[in-house]
Image (tube, helix red, strand yellow):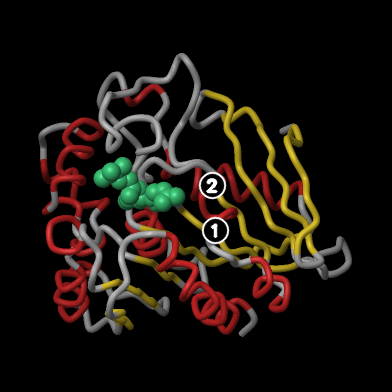
Amino acid sequence: MSLEVLSKAKVCGGWHKQYSHSSSRLNCDMRFAIFLPPNATADTPVPVLYWLSGLTCTDENFMQKAGAFAKAAELGIAIVAPDTSPRGDDVADDDGYDLGKGAGFYLNATQAPWSANYHMYDYIVDELPTLIEQHFPVTKVKSISGHSMGGHGALTIGLKNQNSYRAISAFSPITNPINCPWGQKAFTHYLGSNKELWLDYDACELLKMQASSLPILVDQGDADGFLAEQLKPENLLDAAKQSNTEITLRMQPGYDHSYYFIQSFINEHLDFHSTHLFS
Ligand SMILES: N[C@@H](CCC(=O)N[C@@H](CSC=O)C(=O)NCC(=O)O)C(=O)O
């Protein structure tokens, strides 16, 4: 599979690059960004942290706003930030910011018109890592993190693929999409009205059914305007108890839902991932 380089810039001794490629799973051209730390060479490949962004984001929000490069360079970790949905003129969309482009919810849609392109689950789990491992000096060792809708993606993809990742972390994740307006709207459109089929993409339901062998770190701001209606971290803790899974949930006083919050704690998440990526 070929890649087209869209931009490159040296940063913190490493490189930030953006690429486009044709995605067979999403049936469209896709963009992603990668940060390669200074020590990443063919002789010394490095592990990868996959970062999943939230509603309305592209590959750029995390890379431009999170302030992650200095720490990732120091630790020797590559970071890959995919887009949040399929893109292009032929891809179905909606007027709302919480459905369609920019709102792929990291699942495989089964309902028309979404099912033609919206297979972000398969893209993140299989297609993108295969591409990254073919083209860049990285190992197969990886972990996963994300924000809000991307926190939901990191939790559900990590929990469903525990042999593929070393650790999961999330900022302000949608923990229980089947019980919040964002998730209910998206799942109705993408998966249909049979709510049994929604359970497979809900972190709380997954945790009730199976314990996590992966360490999980969650940070949540207590001044986040989406906290009570959309995010519900207490539901994640209740579900984790049912399978005896330990989750570190840190309620951070005064922080909102923005990238200022992510920037404030990203170094601690990178240290957490480093511990498990290099163990
Ligand atoms: N436009 C919406 C909210 C959009 C928003 O807050 N998006 C967040 C993710 S929310 C959950 O997935 C985000 O990361 N935005 C991009 C950024 O760079 O901040 C509204 O107005 O309510």
User: Crowding near pointer 2: few (<14 within 10 Å), some, many (20+)?
Assistant: few
Query: Where does residue 6 sit, x and y in percent of width and height?
Result: 73, 35
User: Disc 2 residue type?
Assistant: Asp
Where, by quadrant of the figure, is residue 36 drawn?
Answer: bottom right
Q: Which residue carries the number 2 mark?
A: 126
Q: Are marks 1 and 2 in contact (CB under 8 Å)?
A: no
Q: Which residue carries the number 1 mark?
A: 50
Where, by quadrant of the figure, is residue 77 drawn?
Answer: bottom right
Q: Please tell me how many numbered marks the rendered image carries.
A: 2
The mark nearer the N terminus, 1 or 2, is 1
In the image, residue 140 above or below residue 265: above
Mark 1 lies on a secondary structure that is: strand
User: Crowding near pointer 1: few (<14 within 10 Å), some, many (20+)?
Assistant: many
Query: Where does residue 236 sit, x and y in percent of width and height?
Result: 21, 70
Quarter of the figure with the N terminus = top right
Where, by quadrant of the figure, is residue 76 drawn?
Answer: bottom right
Quarter of the figure with the C terminus = bottom right
